[in-house]
Image (cartoon, grey):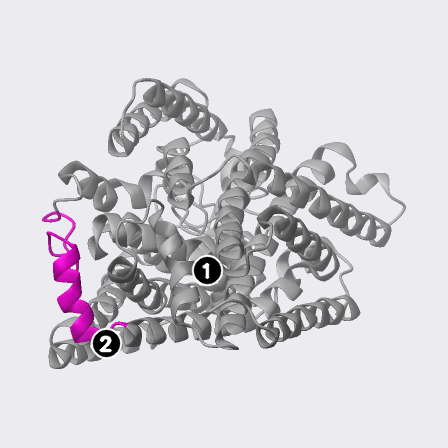
Amino acid sequence: MPFETADYLVVAGYILLMIAVAWAAKVRGQESLDDFFAGGKNLPWWLVGVSMVATTFAADTPLAITGIVAKQGIAGNWFWWNWMISGIVTVFIYAKLWKRADVITDVEFIELRYGGKPASFLRGFRALYFAFPFNCIIMGWVTVGMAKILTVVTGADQWVAILVLYGLIGIYIAISGLWGVMVTDFVQFILAMAGTIALAYFSVDHVGGLSELKSQLGEVANYDILSFNPFTNPEIALTTAFIWLGMNWWAAWYPGAEPGGGGYIAQRMFSAKDEKNAVGGTLLFNILMYAVRPWPWILVGLVALVVFPGLEDPETGYPLMMLEVLPVGWMGLLMVAFLSAFVSTISTQLNWGTSYVVNDFYKRFIKNEEEFENKEKAQKHYVFISRVATLLMAALGVGVSYFFDSVSGGWEFILSLSAGIGGVLLLRWFWWRINAWSEISAMVAAFIGAVFSSQMGYDFSGSMIFTTTFSTIIWLAATFVTKPESEETLKKFYAKVTPMGSWSGYRGGNYTTDRLLPQLVNIGMSLGAIFFFLYGLGQIFFFNAGTGIGFLLGGCIFVWAVVRKI
């Protein structure tokens, strides 16, 4: 059903709400970089966790999931479900370490862990490398997803609509800072989930219920499209399945699933008021992201296969289902859900990218704090520059969008471009021998490996294997042929962060209270809980409700056992 007046009124109400939150954030005050980029570092776990998951709930994601389900069935989602391993490892091993580091960005952490000119170069290079190429690519594919929805649902010129949206978002984030982003994230996540659940309900009802959907899927697919097992799926190469579960989660950098945390996930850990809230928020994020969010998208993707078989672009199945099944008013709610997801992600990308440009490049290398009469003037200047940089980055995001026509293609591009970086990001906390040259060489080698594998015509799995192997060999070699960090740098880092691992010569009387075995148990139970929730819901929807309820209860027991120890 096309957009009606009631739908436009619902969307207008959402835009007014967004403006009100931005104004409230401005009234609250954004006087320093800590306020603008870390929310004042005093936020509770529930806001931290919901903000994380809202940020990754982009408008592109349901479309990508619809495309994956159409091509590879439910098992194809292991392309991204594997990141739950990295996410849960981050919860119990890395979240408390990030909070102890007490920095504004994960790039600032570089000059805490390393020293000298190599560390300064790495901080500046990484700030610009991730703020512009990587960040703008991410905004590009997110924008493509939203553009497809606007074109299918409203018939509006997609790029005029996108320019208007970016203008509103750029002004909004420039005014509000991270506090405004995170408060809006909380509201946006509720709206987005309500909208996607409603669409799933109307879609399943449209084909006669879950039993009828299961029956019709058997007619359009010549394999078990409902299976969770990627190793027996004829549409997924065996090597690809092994890459997903054995390499993706630790080897490559991906926004929201960085090995050991990083990016805007680390930014939200910094915003938590203490270690306990950082850990709790990150655990909540992983449960919501992998156990709660996926099923409404998957159900709509499965229905789209039945209602619109043989689509040239299967990703458009999602917005087509919106037009097919939603009554008046509900279409407006779904558009609000997508706008919420889009605004949440783009506002985070802008705030995160700007934090690198201002905190880790402009402030560090162009105009440092010592050049001002006092700290207050310096902070006001940096906040002003942050607002200007936000608007400029928004313009770049729109420009990059023209180069993408597929959402999942952008996902694979980022993974192949960063393959092999993950190892050094994980180990730098625990192995004193890693130095700035380790990270520099890993980033350069990953880029070279990705370009070479592309020229050789490797598919995704071949590219991941080659680039990860090549970059890992290079960064390990660079580690051993260059000097370690100075004793002073290593002792200072250990004294502040107190990580586990190989630090015997640099403890200086400080000893970590962290223990590996209890955290490994927590990791195992948390992964079990997420899988039990995910698989249990699938059983309830399509197979045996009793079995599904049993899995859900098992997941709840695991969560209870973990939470009581945080």
Q: What stretch of residues is rendered in magenta?
A: 207-233
Mark 1, secondary structure of its residue: loop
In the image, what residue occupies the spot 45% across and 76% down?
327
Between residue 482 and residue 385, name the one nearer to us.
Answer: 385
* Labelled disc at residue 208: 2
- List x then y, in percent, for residue 146: 52, 53
Q: Residue at x 29, y 21 (%)?
A: 457
Disc assigned to residue 57: 1
Q: Residue at coordinates 49% horizontally, 38% vertically from top-left?
A: 490
* Residue 342 coordinates in the image, percent (x, y): 54, 58
Foreground mark, 1 or 2, reads 2
Q: Identify which residue, 422 or 170, lies in the foreground.
A: 170
- Along the viewing direction, whichever of 395 and 494 lies nearer the viewer: 395
Q: Is residue 368 left or right of residue 173?
A: right
Name the image quarter holding residue 324.
bottom left
Rendered image quadrant of residue 434: top left
Pointer 2: residues within 10 angstroms few (<14), some, or many (20+)? few
Q: Relative to 245, is 314 on the left or the right?
A: right
> Circles 1 and 2: CB distance less than 8 Å?
no
